[in-house]
Amino acid sequence: MTGAEIMLATLRANGVSVCFANPGTTELDVVRAFDAAEDLRCVVGLQENVCTGAADGYGRMTGTPAATLLHLGPGFANGIANLHNARRARTPIVNIIGDHASWHLPYDAPLTSDIESLAAPVSGWVRRIDSVADIASATTEAVARTRMSGGQGTTLIFPADFQSARQDAAPLDSRTDDALLHPPVSAFDLESVARRLRAGSRIVFLLGGGGEGSGLSARSQRAVARLCAGLNASAYSETFPSRSERGRGLPAFDRLPYFPEPARHVLDPADVVVLVGALRPITYFGYEGHPSALVPDERLLTLSLPGENAAERLEALANALNAPAYAEPEAAFAPLAEGALTPAGIAGVLCSALPDQAIVSVEGGTCGYPFYAASSAAAAHTTLTNTGGAIGQGLPVAMGAAIACPDRPVVALLSDGSAQYTIQALWSLAHEGLNVVVLIAANHQYAILRNELRRNGAPLSERAEAMTSLDNPRIDWVRLAEGYGVRAARAATTDELTASLRDAFGRKGPTLIEMAL
Amino acid sequence: MTGAEIMLATLRANGVSVCFANPGTTELDVVRAFDAAEDLRCVVGLQENVCTGAADGYGRMTGTPAATLLHLGPGFANGIANLHNARRARTPIVNIIGDHASWHLPYDAPLTSDIESLAAPVSGWVRRIDSVADIASATTEAVARTRMSGGQGTTLIFPADFQSARQDAAPLDSRTDDALLHPPVSAFDLESVARRLRAGSRIVFLLGGGGEGSGLSARSQRAVARLCAGLNASAYSETFPSRSERGRGLPAFDRLPYFPEPARHVLDPADVVVLVGALRPITYFGYEGHPSALVPDERLLTLSLPGENAAERLEALANALNAPAYAEPEAAFAPLAEGALTPAGIAGVLCSALPDQAIVSVEGGTCGYPFYAASSAAAAHTTLTNTGGAIGQGLPVAMGAAIACPDRPVVALLSDGSAQYTIQALWSLAHEGLNVVVLIAANHQYAILRNELRRNGAPLSERAEAMTSLDNPRIDWVRLAEGYGVRAARAATTDELTASLRDAFGRKGPTLIEMAL
């Protein structure tokens, strides 16, 4: 076997079954090795941030790592932004970065760069392969380590000479440290937590996103609803959960507001803020006059850490506190506004059209907040948000989610500014025939920046308006999508959007709908 | 003045007049400061690699740095690939990266990351602003240091609180170390160089790209042609020059071939290889059976370092060696092939249609090599190539060159695979109304990878073919361009391309031509 074949076989043996790839010359032996790894799916992206974002979406939905295959430092660099988001989402990912042959590296050829320096900020663990004998154990460890810290990315740097070098018997059964397979679990003392909650007068639960058992899993949310009823407490989703269950049958917990004033309105009165797999709340940016840490340590109570199973603890707590049984809330749609589209109108239409078990990847504030506010009345669905603030995440994450869950319809609800950063993902949607409905909120501006610029009451200067405008020329999203082979339509009214959505959900493959705002 | 206003004023005072920007919330005080910096042009890109690539193109054409304005670590990361190319091109650039308020940074908010670790591999110098008083001197030094090492990028990390903080008198006259303004010049002993060349029996000159006085400036090339005639020597351009003058009136020096076999065919017989602002030749990748360093040190003779003025040395040398006067070569076009487009046919059409003083940004091998081979017969023009191998450079570099040289027509000659990485640049071309003709060689594959995969004679496997295919669906470049507001056409024959080019060069603003291959 070649070193590259050993790596792919080891990935498969450790449960990795998808690789998002944008290879170059230094990864060609890995490309060749795919011939002997038929059950390892390879999905090509036209730009690396598409690959890493898709791996993020895949990992969020499956809880198991996808691999990425990227071309030296510069190719990897193109994928860093979405690895930053994945790091904040605690998504397991194994990055494979090809590099020059080890004997060629000292000559500083044009594509040479300091890959370790680039990789460290977005990798929980980085390892440079330094022999063929090293490949199987390094790859096994890379997969195992994606479980650490509640989920993380790991990076293997794979010089070209070790990809092509041959070794007869691949030690695929290489052992992994038991500590890696069973990361430590935080302490939980039911009695003392129950005591503190009984003593609290105003309790807020803050629920962190993630997969099975996370604070925003269906099971945890139901237990939290019981606790809220029993303790007269309230609960919020963290502002940008990696993954949350939502819709009919679940409590209508809102997200913690983004801006500090409304967030403090929620948190300041609380004497206990219970962190259920959420990090302590920090303002998104530094805002003069507001503390960075929105809740002092002494008012925080950590029930579980991100990546841990919170559901059992919550249920035990609800039982210990004799909380009432879970009562499903009444879910009713607000009447649909007719006429020209507005963010609230879009939210209403989407919520009423959303198929059961859909996955909604949300990026951008214009429609993101109104959708979340309305979505408790929609059919049961899963929401994925931008966890790290690196724009260009929503489309690739939707792509990865569609590959992870081929039987679930996927929606990407995006702002036009955000969607541009990884627009090349449209081609992969078409190439793979993925069932993704891409909704573009086309207001032709960087609205979030204008909102921030206007925060202190100052009017927008002519120059600042120009620097935040996408209006000249207006991007024609229908042509753009069709250019990538994606079916597309434009909707300017509630009725048009309803019809376009019905059509899109009824077909195979991707559709893009430009929503005129 | 605010800190941000001080920075922009200092940039202006040091000769920076363009900023390529993709700002976010942590750069809003810089956005505000543009109100008081009317003569500092701000060009918005929809993705950061567009901004950094444009700064590279601008710097290559002007020799003076543009600024970039980027959003924390993840926004900067999106621009690293083209900063890698700029580093290899030795282009002066000043990157301004906004960051969280200094007092907010320790709280590890979602967008926090290790910016220094990301910036180091592509920055000759990195400085984090740590007070308002620091801004003017740090900015002055950042601009000055872009002259070092033959030209380099520098990076200022600018926390949001220092952007908004006020200081009354801005010390705009902050002094810069004299050593920074006058970098050291390499030693040159005319007599000993002349002696070694006289003693050589087979001499090859290797010419490095750059601006005025570089090995590939018109003046240097003419002097080298004299030396070649006098010494019976030959001369080659380095394979990927940052900038080279080319066309009628200049010698028809070829580029040093990319693959090791033909490169060695040129270099192995030489007993002296004269480096004229070029680095010693290294194979692009490590190839088994070929040395990384194509020429042993003892056969190298360094006439000038990259970034130095080689022209005077070359002329002195030609005179000392009594080389004959420069004789303009006869330039004749090969007859145009009729019918369906081929890479050679495209090269012929473009060379005959090229306006005088055009700038041609070349990326991708499919048309790049044939164009270069034919372009000595074209009207005098400037060629810019991909210096660092990070794909996605050609379109933004063309954009930056068009901003640097508004009176010169610009052509971007691109492969379809490469052009996708920074496709968002099309919008900026339309937004700024730049006179750029974008030529897309649409073969719907990653041809360079297929060439490399076939190098050892093996046929392409089905899987490898799929992983290097852009064929399903085929990108419709005309729709894509029109989606971004760029006029577009498709050409399948020599005649169609000739007509499309004539039309495109006759109009204001950008045009894209999809060339069917």
Image (cartoon, coloured by chain):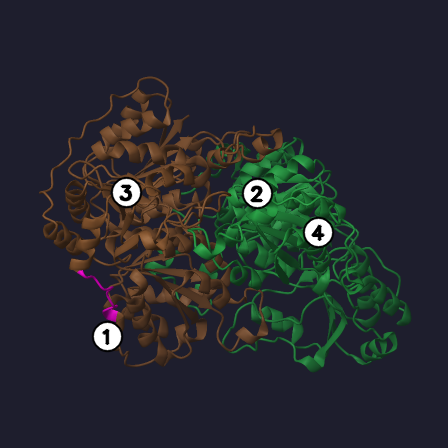
Chain colours: A green, B brown
What whole-number distance in Å separates the C-alpha atoms at marks 2 and 3?
52 Å
Do the residues at pointers 3 and 4 share their chain? no
Of marks 1 and 3, the one in the foreground? 3
Can you identify the residue that label 1 sits on? Answer: B178
Q: Chain of mark 4?
A: A
Q: Answer with the quarter of the image where residue B517 lies.
A: top left
Per the rendering, the mark at residue A136 is 4
Helix, strand or loop at mark 2: strand
Q: For the magenta stretch, what is the residue range?
A: B181-189
Quick one: label 1 or label 3, which is nearer the N terminus? 1
Callout 2 amino acid = Leu
The three-letter code of the residue at mark 4 reads Ala
Whether residue A275 is situated above or below residue A332 in the rendered picture: below
* Residue at horizontal 84 percent and vertical 67 percent from the top: A313
User: Could you classify mark 3 by the number of other residues whose Cα lies within 10 Å: few (under 14), some (14-19), or many (20 or more)?
Assistant: many
Q: Nearer the viewer, mark 2 or mark 3?
A: 3
Q: Which mark is residue B236?
A: 3
Q: How far is the residue under mark 1 from the one under mark 2?
A: 56 Å
Residue A315 position by quadrant: bottom right
Whether residues under marks 4 and 1 lie with C-beta atoms below 8 angstroms apart, the answer is no
Dot 2 corresponds to which residue? A439
- Distance between the Cα atoms at labels 4 and 1? 54 Å
Residue shown at 20%/57% (left/top)?
B309
Q: Secondary structure at mark 4?
A: helix
Q: Verify CB contact (< 8 Å) between mark 2 and mark 3.
A: no
Considering the whole magenta stretch, tell me its main secondary structure.
Answer: loop
Q: Do the residues at discs 2 and 3 belong to one chain?
A: no
**Residue at left offset 64%, top offset 62%:** A125
Q: Looking at the picture, which amino acid does disc 3 mark? A: Tyr
